[in-house]
Image (cartoon, helix red, strand yellow):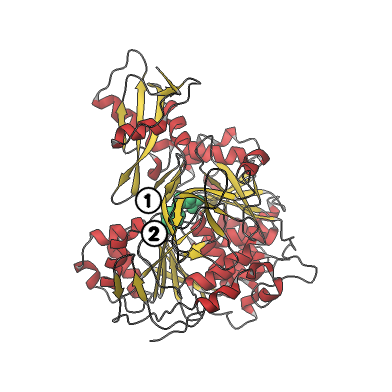
Amino acid sequence: MSKKSNILNPQIINIETGLETHKLDTIKKFPVKANLANYQPLYDTFNYDKSLSDEIIYYADGSLNVAYNAIDRHLVNGRKNKVAIYAIDNSLAVKKYTYNDLFILSNQAANALVKLGVKKGDRVFIFLPRIIETYVITLALARIGAIAGPLFSAFGPDALKDRLLDSGAKVIVTDTNLKPRLESIKKNLPDLESIVVVGGKTAELDKNEYAYAEIISNQPKTFNNCHLKPEDPLYMLYTSGTTGKPKGVVHVQNDLKCQHMTTKWVLDLQEDDIYWCTADPGWVTGMVYGIYGPLSNGASVVCFEPGFNAKAWFKVLEDLQVTVWYTSPTALRMLMKEGFNLVKEYNLNALRHILSVGEPLNPEVIRWGMEVFNLPIHDNWWQTETGSQMISNLPCLPIKLGSMGKPLPGIYAAIVDDEGNELEPGQIGKLVLKPGWPSMFNSLWRDVERYDEYFKIKNWYFTGDNAWKDTDGYFWFIGRSDDVINTSGHRVGPFEVESALLEHEYIVEAGVIGIPDEERGEIIKAFIVLKDGISESEEVLKDIKDFIKKQLAFHAYPRLIEVRDKLPKTRSGKIMRRLLKAQELGLPQGDLTGLDD
Ligand code: AMP
């Protein structure tokens, strides 16, 4: 099978590291050749609406609707009966939904939500597992112009309360399994008007709670899409910084330009591809490259409800003949741990393009990928704030093992010092981007000051990551420049975990850091000081662990807890996480002049 790539029609791949060159002559399916001469002129593409005129449809007055682009237009361009979603439930049964099905379902959902009082600009949160309704509601909200707020289905009550309260959520859509996590907090959400429950029955629900199936069943199958300005909000996603509670990152309608084009260039989706993005729609990758980007490109998308299970994953790849697969380094490392025998039981010949995002992709995982899939794994880098992929190993570029790739067309990335001066290739510094690409976050929810902070040095957008660039323009990730933890590709703010720990009656102080872990990238370690009169014991620690697991998401609870008599603090009383980390990892402790002793 030789498929033409969407971008630059490349020929052969050559994977290089600084020292060694792997010539992958045996590569069978994905013909790739770097052609920088063709690549460069695409720079600035995002700035020319004309070049996108075939790709994104705007109304005559310059407004647009994302749901029109993701669904409606496919009803008149030959994709009406094409499968939009392969929904796989927990028993691994597959149900197909065509673009026409998605059109009807999302119109009915939009009508039902409007009947509940949802209007343009309202925040509606989606607290659902990976099921068809997650797609339907996301797109129904796009029709109305309401702001979709994805919530990771593993979140516990504390994590939910922070986000729902701050955003002033008006409606939450959830299901019967997840709803109990809202019970203890719903009374403390003054703006909340309704909860819609997928799988719920009216007789079993409280006042202002609605059974999803019942409220959509008699709704009209058409809906008048709201015409939205490019700068009107589309979705908001809470993400963690080094200080304070998670912040609401707001993205707008015009993000679709980047979502659509990067899906085309980086994921290389083509008409007959079956595409599986394993990320949860509660995270930005699951939203942008699980829903908006691929549907806008008219792709057939896999929606997989169960959690991670190596056998089930390989079975899905085989049974559905998945051709393009977008996943994470942690998932790949977990599959790699299964060894070679399991994967050999499955016929994965349909796969032609594999991508990874969210954390550093180790060279040994790429080598393993070559062995078992006979395909290179293409790493790419971006963030919730950037709204779409920024740095990528495009299909047309030779891969340097361990590098995130090169900035995409229209994106200018650089490595700078603390004053914003660009550094020479080879020097480690702060990874920054030149602001202005269409999917750049448009605001932080009700926090202008914090938004401006990102851009305050020489008008660069500071990503919070450290990296370096080589002489060929490839970018290499070093780590975060702040205290943010990346565990299994999920961004966790230490403050959030510390706050949850402090809610436990035995704890008076808490400091949280990430420590390296072979499988998950980092795991979370908490240092705590116990209240006077409470001493460390197995029961005390178990009580704390059980408590924290319930409060936070599964990925965000500290796997390790150490009790200390006191924690290192600055004179102003701030816990010095940097010092805790240095002590834990046996690293130099750096400048200790601010330490309060
Ligand atoms: P999030 O906003 O939750 O998507 O997290 C974004 C952060 O994940 C980035 O700032 C990086 O620290 C990390 N990240 C994303 N992609 C990569 C990658 N390809 N390599 C290394 N780190 C990554």
Residue 328's label in the rendered image is: 2
If the image is split into quadrants, where does the N terminus sit? Answer: bottom left
- Left or right, residue 452 beside residue 585: right
Q: Residue at image x 37%, y 60%?
A: 90
Mark 2: give few (<14), some (14-19) or many (20+) Cα within 10 Å.
many
Residue 287's label in the rendered image is: none
- Left or right, residue 150 beside residue 597: right
Question: Are the residues flagged by discs 1 and 2 in contact, CB closer than 8 Å?
Answer: yes
Residue 257 in the image, given as x and y percentages of width and height: 63, 66
Residue 519 in the image, given as x and y percentages of width and height: 29, 52
Q: Residue at image x 50%, y 57%?
A: 382
- Left or right, residue 298 beside residue 567: right
Residue closest to the eye, 113 or 364: 364
Q: Is residue 528 visible?
A: yes
Residue matched to label 1: 488
Q: Residue 252 is drawn in which quadrant?
A: bottom right
Q: Return the residue found at the far front.
A: 424
Residue 498 in the image, given as x and y percentages of width and height: 44, 31
Q: Residue at image x 63%, y 78%?
A: 75
Task: Name the kind of residue labelled 1 in the image.
Answer: Ser
Q: Return the residue found at the far left.
A: 341
Q: Return the residue found at the far right.
A: 61
Q: Is residue 116 above or below residue 65?
A: above
Residue 206 in the image, given as x and y percentages of width and height: 57, 41
